[in-house]
Image (cartoon, rainbow, N blue to C red):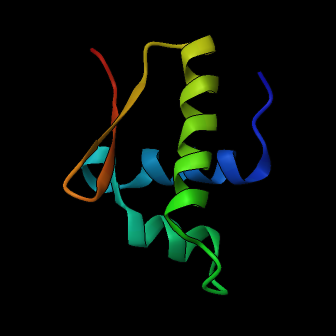
């Protein structure tokens, strides 16, 4: 599965983040530094990443308290 550049950056940020958790504001600031990020764009990007992950692995992304959390099963 080939990730789009934005999806690849998002996955990398999840893997680097403490607790594998990213707030929606951090996602927006990271991927759309010009301020054009909004909830719809974030949701679309998360949906694409979830789809790619489901085809490759058991990794999941959950949403809670205005943040997304990458779940890495042991």
Q: Is residue 3 above or below residue 74?
A: below
Q: Is residue 72 above or below residue 48?
A: above
- Depth check: 36 or 59 in front? 36
Question: Residue 37's image quarter?
Answer: bottom right
At x 61%, y 13%, the residue is: 56
Q: In the visual, does 47 lie left or right of 66? A: right
- Depth check: 2 or 32 in front? 32
Tell me residue 45's x, y (percent). Answer: 61, 48
At x 64%, y 53%, the residue is: 9
- Depth check: 9 or 32 in front? 32
Question: Residue 34's image quarter?
Answer: bottom right
At x 52%, y 77%, the residue is: 29
- Depth check: 45 or 74 in front? 45
At x 28%, y 54%, the residue is: 18
The residue most toward the front is 40
The residue most toward the left is 65
Q: In the visual, does 72 lie left or right of 32? A: left
Give the quadrant of the C terminus: top left
The residue most toward the bottom is 34
Tell me residue 41's x, y (percent). Answer: 61, 59
Give the quadrant of the N terminus: top right
Tell me residue 63's x, y (percent). Answer: 30, 43
Q: In the visual, does 29 lie left or right of 21? A: right
């Amino acid at each position: 599965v080939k990730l789009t550049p934005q999806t690849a950056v998002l996955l990398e940020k999840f893997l680097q983040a403490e607790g594998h958790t990213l707030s929606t504001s951090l996602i927006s600031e990271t991927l759309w530094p010009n301020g054009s990020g909004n909830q719809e764009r974030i949701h679309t990007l998360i949906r694409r990443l979830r789809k790619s992950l489901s085809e490759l692995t058991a990794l999941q992304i959950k949403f809670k308290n205005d943040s997304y959390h990458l779940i890495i099963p042991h």
